[in-house]
Structure formats: C-alpha cells, structure tokens
Image: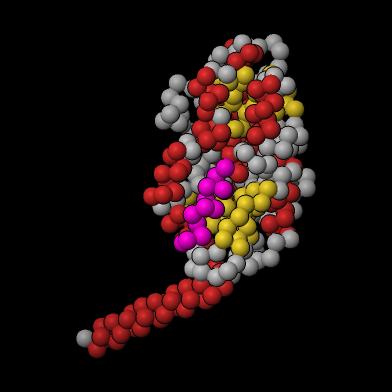
C-alpha cells in the first residue's frame, strides 16, 4: 500500500510539474510573440497554390499564438522554391518568427543529391502540412488529346511547363516520361504554377504535370469546368474522390522498376509536398506553440468557411507526422535512389 501511495504521489508531482512547465512556456511565448511579426516565406510567385494557402493561413493563425502576432506572406520564387528552402535552412534566425513554405519535393532532391541543395530536412523543424499532394497532368484542350491513351500514343511530345529541377512540375514529368514513356518535352524556368497556367491558356505550352488537385481547385477551377483545360492523369496511390474517372499514372507502368519509381518519386514525395518548416534549432517550446496553433487554425470555423468559398481542400497533417514521413523517405533502398538520381539529373 505504501509503495502504491508513493507511486501515486510521484505521478501527481509529475503532472503538476508538467502543467507548471506548460503554463510557464505559454507565458514566455506570449511575452515573446506580443507585437511581433511572423513571416511565411513562400518559394513561389503570388497567385499559385502555395501562395494561396499560405495567405489563407496567415489571416487566422495569429489568434491562436500567444501574444497574437501579425502574420504576413513574403514570396521568394526561384529554382522551384529551392532558393527559399536554402534560405530557411541557412539564413533565417531560429527564433520562431519565420516559417518556410517551399515545395517538399525538394526533399527528394536532397535525397538524390540534387544540385544546389544545401538544406537537410531531417534537421529542420516541421509545423505541419496542409495535406497530401495529389498530382495531376493537365493539357490544353486545343491539343486535341482528351485521355491518357491518346497521349501515350501521340507521335508529337507535349510541351510541359516546369519551374526548376526539384519542383513537382519538373520531377513528376521526368519520372512519368521514364516510367510510362509519356511523350513530353519539358520547358522549365517559370516562376511558379501561376505563370505556367497563363502559358498553358495562351498556347505557349501544352500543359503541365505535377500540379496538385488542391491547387487546381483553388486557382484553375473555371478553366477545368469550361473545358479549356483537361485533366488527363492523376499520380497517387488511389484516385481522388472528386476524380473517380481520371486514370492513375501507375496503372500504365509495365514493370516493377517503373512502379517503384512512381511510388517513391511521386507518391511518397507527395506526402510532404506542402509542409510548413522552421529552421534547425528553433526553440522546442516555440515549435510546439506553432504546431498547436496550426492545428487549431485548420479547425477554425471561419477559416474553414473561407477555405470552402475559395475551393481550398483542407486535410491537415500534424508536425510530428510530417517529421516521421520525411525520416521514412531517407530509408529508401539505394538502388531506387540511384535510379531516381539518374532520371532527375
């Protein structure tokens, strides 16, 4: 009985100490964040999916952070968001005042030793992610191609727009060209999907791959509904509920190697595409504060109402899970990594 009694006292003291620590951390963060400005640095130009989601988040997240700081969005386009990823990792102060919103596909670039990658996602802190990516291949209806079979049989390669090596638009197109022999020619160098959309609509290029359904819903819905552009393929392990008739890219893979390339290079990478990051060594209490605020924001009724009006799909992933998914990517078999490196060079 005495032993149980002492154990009970120990648990009670531990609970009290934990509660006291939480209260102290909250008070310290309130004092720190009061009157401050938090930046969300988006690695693409204004008007694209990353930018649209970040601006939506910035309008509500501040009220869930102790001290109610102002949150602003800054665009830092370049190299498929690699510039912003390196900036968050190497330049930004680890003080909890700068959040990165770069394309998580750059993590795949780090895995395969991509040129110019100097950040290590395993050392960064992760606030969370707005959801899994669900990549699409979309073509201008003027190409005359209405389905995947017609595209795969086309004698003329489709001109697809991209941002830079490491961007989803570039990597997805390259992987599908290798894995299912998709007739395409990549024209890269656009600042983001907003610029690529304009190029597709004007006929400058024929389409793009690696544009997520959540971004299409938010920024290109009218063109889809009017038939101006056509969704040809979706690259995910299973069809999106809203796209039941659009075939999966992996269904056209003819070998185990081809399927592995798509699963690792697209499906697995898609799980971390939309993560929000912090620099390494950001104080743990501020990391936890921002993680909690993120999860509270994506449940906020006003936020969800505005997201619905803007056709934004919300399927959040906690920071801890995002971190685990990234760690898992780095357990990929060496032979698969080597093949991806060859394809994405």
Q: Is residue 203 visible?
A: yes
Display coloring = secondary structure
> In this view of the protein, which residue sits in the foreground, 300 or 125?
300
Q: Which residues are magenta?
A: 52-64
* Figure disc tally: 0
Toward the right, the furthest residue is: 116
* Position of the N terminus by quadrant: bottom left
Residue at the image point whose x is 65% and y is 63% from the top: 280
In x, y percent, where is residue 164? 73, 37
The kind of secondary structure the magenta stretch mainly shows is: helix
**Residue 57 falls within the magenta-colored stretch:** yes
Residue 318 drawn at (x, y percent): 47, 54
| On screen, residue 5 above or below 339 | below
Q: Is residue 340 left or right of residue 134?
A: right
Q: Quadrant of residue 133?
A: top right
Seen in the image, is 126 located left or right of residue 296? right
**Image quadrant assignment for residue 99:** bottom right
Residue 277 occupies which quadrant of the picture?
bottom right
> Does residue 258 lie above or below 270 as drawn?
above
Task: Pinpoint residue 251: horizontal percent, then vertical percent.
Answer: 52, 23
Please report the residue visible at 24 percent of the width from the left and 89 percent of the height from the top.
Answer: 2
Q: Quadrant of the C terminus?
A: top right
């Amino acid at each position: 009985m005495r032993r149980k009694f002492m154990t009970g006292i120990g648990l009670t003291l531990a609970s009290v100490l934990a509660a006291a620590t939480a209260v102290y951390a909250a008070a310290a963060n309130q004092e720190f964040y009061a009157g401050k400005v938090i930046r969300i640095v988006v690695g693409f130009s204004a008007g694209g999916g990353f930018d649209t989601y970040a601006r939506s988040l910035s309008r509500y997240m501040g009220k869930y952070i102790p001290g109610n700081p102002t949150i602003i969005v800054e665009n830092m386009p370049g190299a498929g968001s690699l510039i912003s990823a390196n900036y968050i990792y190497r330049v930004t102060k680890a003080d909890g005042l700068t959040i990165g919103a770069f394309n998580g596909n750059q993590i795949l670039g780090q895995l395969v030793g991509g040129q110019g990658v100097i950040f290590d996602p395993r050392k960064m802190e992760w606030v969370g992610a707005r959801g899994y990516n669900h990549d699409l291949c979309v073509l201008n209806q003027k190409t005359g191609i209405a389905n995947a079979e017609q595209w795969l049989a086309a004698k003329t390669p489709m001109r697809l727009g991209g941002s830079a090596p490491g961007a989803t638009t570039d990597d997805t197109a390259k992987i599908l060209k290798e894995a299912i022999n998709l007739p395409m020619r990549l024209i890269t160098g656009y600042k983001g999907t907003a610029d690529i959309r304009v190029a597709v609509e004007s006929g400058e290029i024929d389409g793009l791959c690696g544009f997520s359904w959540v971004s299409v819903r938010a920024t290109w819905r009218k063109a889809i509904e009017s038939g101006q552009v056509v969704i040809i393929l979706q690259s995910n392990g299973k069809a999106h509920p809203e796209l039941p008739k659009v075939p999966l890219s992996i269904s056209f893979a003819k070998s185990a190697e081809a399927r592995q390339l798509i699963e690792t290079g697209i499906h697995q990478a898609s799980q971390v595409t939309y993560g929000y990051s912090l620099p390494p060594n950001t104080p743990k209490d501020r990391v936890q504060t921002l993680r909690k605020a993120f999860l509270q924001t994506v449940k906020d009724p006003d936020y969800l109402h505005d997201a619905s009006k803007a056709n934004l799909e919300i399927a959040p992933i906690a920071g801890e899970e995002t971190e685990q998914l990234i760690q898992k990517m780095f357990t990929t078999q060496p032979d698969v990594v080597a093949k991806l490196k060859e394809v994405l060079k």
